[in-house]
Amino acid sequence: MNRNFVFKTSISFSSDPREAVENCISEAYEGLKDVRFAFLFTTDSYDHRVIWETARVLLRGVRFVGLCSGGVIFKDEVYRKAIGVCLIGGEIEVCTSIQGDLSRDPKKVGTSLGEELLESGIREGTVFVFPDGFSSKVSEALKALYEVMGPYFDYVGGCAGDNLRFFKTYQFTEKELRSDAIAAVLIKGIRITSAFGHGWRPTGHYFVITEAKGKTVYKLDEREAFSAYCEAVGPIPPERFAEIGLRYPFGFSSSSGYFLIRDPLKVNPGGSIEFVTEVPVHALGYIMETTKEEMIGTARKVAKEVKGRSETPSLALIFDCISRCILLGKEFQRELLALKEELGEGVGMIGILTFGEIGCLEGVPFLHNKTLLLVTLG
Amino acid sequence: MKINGDSLLSELSCLYEIASLGEAQDLEELLETAKEKAIRLFGLSHYAVFLETSRNERRVFCGWRIKTEEEAQEYLEKAGLRAFYYPFKRNGIGGFLLMAKERPLQNSEMRLFRLFAHSVEDAMGLMVNLEKLKETQKTLEEAFWGMALALTKLVERRDPYTTGHSLGVAELSRKIGEKMGLSEKELMGLYISGLLHDIGKSTIPLEILVKPGRLNELEMKLIRLHAQAGYEILKDIAFPWPVALVALQHHERLDGSGYPQGLKGYEIIREAKIVAVADIVDAMTHDRPYRPGYGIEKAKEELKENKGKKYDPEVVEACLLVLKDHA
């Protein structure tokens, strides 16, 4: 197998952040030469200042990008407290950027991110984008990023989160550790293939989004959003909304038939519903449903699609929505096993549970919910 | 023929969203909404509207950083994207939609896409007309306020002592109305009623208007005619507010001691009760040919003393709050 890059993955479960970073980086470094870049995937329960400072020392001269979330995927398991690393070396060109104040000025964040990445002189490749998943402005930043970088690049990634505490997330590169930011890396020189899917289908019940602003929906079919939603899916005590909303997201269809999923998150006083990300107004939002089998079947389809398009993948990066992990429960491993079976035993697998996934629909980056994004290298 | 449920749903969704383009409140909102829908519904990578009206030119871009059509062409060629043009010319606007995506549209998508472009054209035609109407309305409103001020000045030029009185009454009436929680439309009505409440004074002989010292009974009778005269001047103008009635009733008092009709309490309209209080406060705080101004404290005393007798208590309370703020 001829590859112009080498890689090694490692994971550490040490509860001490310094030790965890040292363990996994030193293990990944073993036998690997000419390391050019590293992905760092962490869970939220660590002191990220320590993680970042340790990584900067150990990865001196190496560019890296990282984010935290509620779980790290390694091989066919997900871990609630771990740090995973993927070191990549070889004939690749890499540029990183991190821009903050995402909630205040998403357009500026997207623009600055794109401009800094283009300053590298790289004019094609794949952009891995890791925004703070708690910001409601990710889509706006993605639009701005696309306006600067255009159709010459592929865009993939996932949003940082925590273990559903909704407190704080971290994004970082070798330059900075931040929250409310987007960290990104542009990689050229590796054949990168991606595919995504969610496996949700319309129940047949739909609403007209008659009043919405950003990620808050005030009215469905001209009625208070929460009451209307309850009529469709059954009575919901407000304190159990997140749990039930998780099972009945909204889907917005495009002319190609693809349903973009939007996840309802909580009920606000007054009966409006807050979603994970922005919701289009004057659009038909279908109530969606799925089964565990359909979700796992989708994972298999996604892996098949990637495998069909990439000749010999050697590494798979997985960005899997945290809500899929919650819904699948103990069977989440079956989703990872399905990926492994389709990709083949020899393919390294590392990833993170995300709070929004970034993948291109017809070349344009969109923020997705409840989606599995699979990115293969090689 | 086998009908695919999912494709029917997606067509239904697209058709609904296309139809809802007309929900936009103005041209800017329409252009923004159409941009969002074009990209989400049709998977367009690039979208632009080149819009030329008789008055101005607008360009909306999404997906690229360019300024001209030529730059757009060059960009699309370089990126190898499929471009779709939809030229339009309607209701004095011309221009075109320029949209691009990575792959050719399928037949069903093309059908929806044409419908989308056609609906954007329709909605833009409507919005441009609506904008023209709004501009005309704005011009007419400005002319209206200019006329009202000109009329006020005409009346006040005859009596230099009352210069600024009508404007003062208009402003104070509006502030009282604000304190009473009136709507913006009602506040506008109060303002114009305040401006024109003394227009009937244009019919009073100049020598009486500017006479220093006390007026005799006959002269007072003549002065009092200005309320009825004001009503006669204003009654045929189709204001959306009771401006003529305010001119007629602004000297009426709750206890029936006012003029010209000696109306009581509920017989007097709310707007006239407000203008009456604003009128008395402005008059008492400014000099007159026959006396110097009494000052704000005296005006407050007058209001407090006659609250519920001559003046409406709610209006008096609101006015006292305004005066307190002002102090």
Image (cartoon, coloured by chain):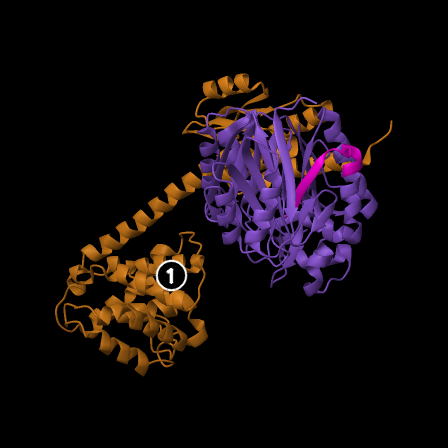
Instruction: Report which quarter residue B17 is drawn in.
Output: top right
Which chain is depicted purple? A
Task: Report whether B184 appears left or right of A241.
Answer: left
Q: Is residue B211 visible?
A: yes
| Residue identified by numbered label 1 | B190
* Position of residue B210 measured from the top left corner of the image (x, y, whole percent): 15, 63
Task: Report whether A104 appears left or right of A355.
Answer: left
> Along the line of sight, which residue is nearer the eye, B257 or A51?
A51
* Position of residue B242 measured from the top left corner of the image (x, y, whole percent): 42, 60
> Along the line of sight, which residue is nearer the eye, B246 or A32?
A32
x 70%, y 26%: residue? A310
Residue A259 sits above or below residue B185 on the image:
above
Magenta range is A340-354
Q: Determine the secondary structure under disc 1.
A: helix
| Within-10-Å neighbours for mark 1: few <14, some 14–19, many 20+ | many
Q: Is residue B126 visible?
A: no
Instruction: Report which quarter residue A85 is drawn in.
Output: top right
Amino acid beneath label 1: Leu
Residue B156 sits above or below residue A97 on the image:
below
Chain of residue at mark 1:
B
Q: How many marks?
A: 1
Q: Residue furthest left?
A: B212
> Along the line of sight, which residue is nearer the eye, B13 or B225?
B13
Q: Residue furthest right?
A: B1
Task: Report whether A109 appears left or right of B156.
Answer: right
Tell me the quadrant of the picture where the N terminus of chain A can be found.
Answer: top right
Instruction: Report which quarter residue B139 is drawn in.
Output: top left
Tell me the quadrant of the picture where the C terminus of chain A can be found.
Answer: top right
- Colour assigned to chain B in the rendering is orange
